[in-house]
Amino acid sequence: MEQFADLWDPVPGWLNTASYGLPPRPAWEALQSVLADWRVGATSWEPWDESTSRSRAAFARLIGADVADVFVGSTVSGAVAPIAAALPDGARVLTDDVEFTSNVFPWKTHEDRGVEVIGVPTAELLDAIRPGVDVVAVSVVQSSTGTVLDVAKVVAASKEIGALVVLDASQAMGWLPLTVDGVDALIVHTYKWLMSPRGATLGYLSPRLQERCRPAAAGWYSGVGGGRSYYGTEMELYADARRFDQSPSWFCFVGAAPALELVEQIGVETINRHNVALANEFREGLGLPPSDSAIVSTTLAGAEEAFAAAGIRAAVRDGKLRASFHLYTTRADVHQALAALKPLT
């Protein structure tokens, strides 16, 4: 990891990647360059949009998907919406009872036609995948607790009953190795562990799910032929997942492309070892057992105030202190955080 350390310039004490990631230098510099061009009108937008294609391709490689099955958007909830709209009346959606609401509310807006959203505790999720469940919609890593989903077991149990598997990987992708084997949809916002500007979302849709969904948000960008889709009443959409594209926020993808490519270059397995080792060193210092997560969530009275006094930036979620560890986190950050909390333990 040492050869990549100079790609970031964090102020010591940033333990909050689960809220947003810090841009690596290639992403930051690419963004500054296009912002400078935008300010003076130095170029048209087409060169900026090449970053959307690069982001799409890097995402596909990272999850082992065909690039034709990848779409782009701006939010997780917006990406889930067409899947939820494709559910039949009376469908049942199973999720975690602490699931981040971007993967809850799009389903719940269909309750007026009998769609039922069922939340169960994390430890009970696998056993709750039973006949009668139509969709399992859950995060690969829980935002509030850091709990890592056993994706293989969830996929296997869902296949047995014919349920769709829709995963929010926003708190996982970038540090946890992932594939889309057996998954129907995997959606990620890139501004956390993929260290991109907020506004670049990427998603995978299995071919069978693409057939079930209507591209209700179709616009010029999801139309074949570039400028031919700008005007008029004739519509020809892409035949693959690109028909679900939303017109991308250019500058967000300009920052996303080099960040995703850097994650590829370093290797997710390498990042995983680094992040989990630091998280477990922090856990050990608090007297907690080791875990497989880059997120540490714990209840410790006075921790938020102690961190603030020491200049440690973390988060409080669901009443618990949440610290998260990524590429630019160092052992010195861990020791600084533990020193701040020592009077409380």
Image: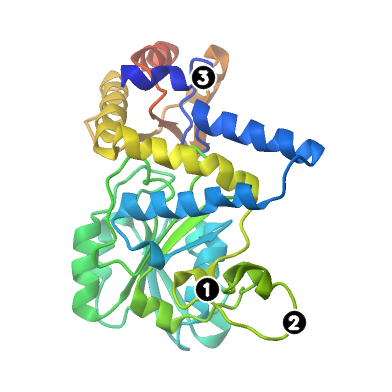
- Which residue is more in the foreground, 91 or 1? 1
Q: Residues within 10 Å of mark 2 (few under 14, many from 20)?
A: few
Q: Which mark is residue 10?
A: 3
Question: How far is the residue under mark 1 from the one under mark 3?
Answer: 39 Å
- Measured as percent of width and height from the top left, residue 9 is found at 52, 18
- Which residue is more in the foreground, 27 or 76? 27
- Give the number of the mark in front: 1 or 3: 1
- Measured as percent of width and height from the top left, residue 281 is found at 27, 21
Q: Residues within 10 Å of mark 3 (few under 14, many from 20)?
A: few
Pointer 2 and pointer 1: residues touching (CB < 8 Å)?
Answer: no
Question: How far is the residue under mark 2 from the one under mark 1?
Answer: 18 Å
**Is the residue 4 above or below the residue 208 in the image?**
above
Pointer 1 and pointer 3: residues touching (CB < 8 Å)?
Answer: no
- Which residue is more in the foreground, 263 or 48? 48
- Measured as percent of width and height from the top left, residue 140 is found at 34, 53
**Is the residue 297 above or below the residue 125 in the image?**
above
Mark 1 vs 3, N-terminal side: 3
- What residue is rendered at 48% in x and 31% in y? 16
- What residue is rendered at 62% in x and 73% in y? 217
Residue identified by numbered label 2 = 232
Element class at badge 3: loop
Please, what is the three-letter code of the amino acid marked with disc 2? Gly
Element class at badge 1: helix
Please, what is the three-letter code of the amino acid marked with disc 1? Arg
Question: How far is the residue under mark 3 from the one under mark 2?
Answer: 49 Å
- What residue is rendered at 25% in x and 26% in y? 277
Q: Quadrant of the C terminus?
A: top left
- What residue is rendered at 37% in x and 46% in y? 173
170 relative position to 161: left or right: right
Please, what is the three-letter code of the amino acid marked with disc 3? Pro
Residue identified by numbered label 1 = 243
Q: Residues within 10 Å of mark 1 (few under 14, many from 20)?
A: many
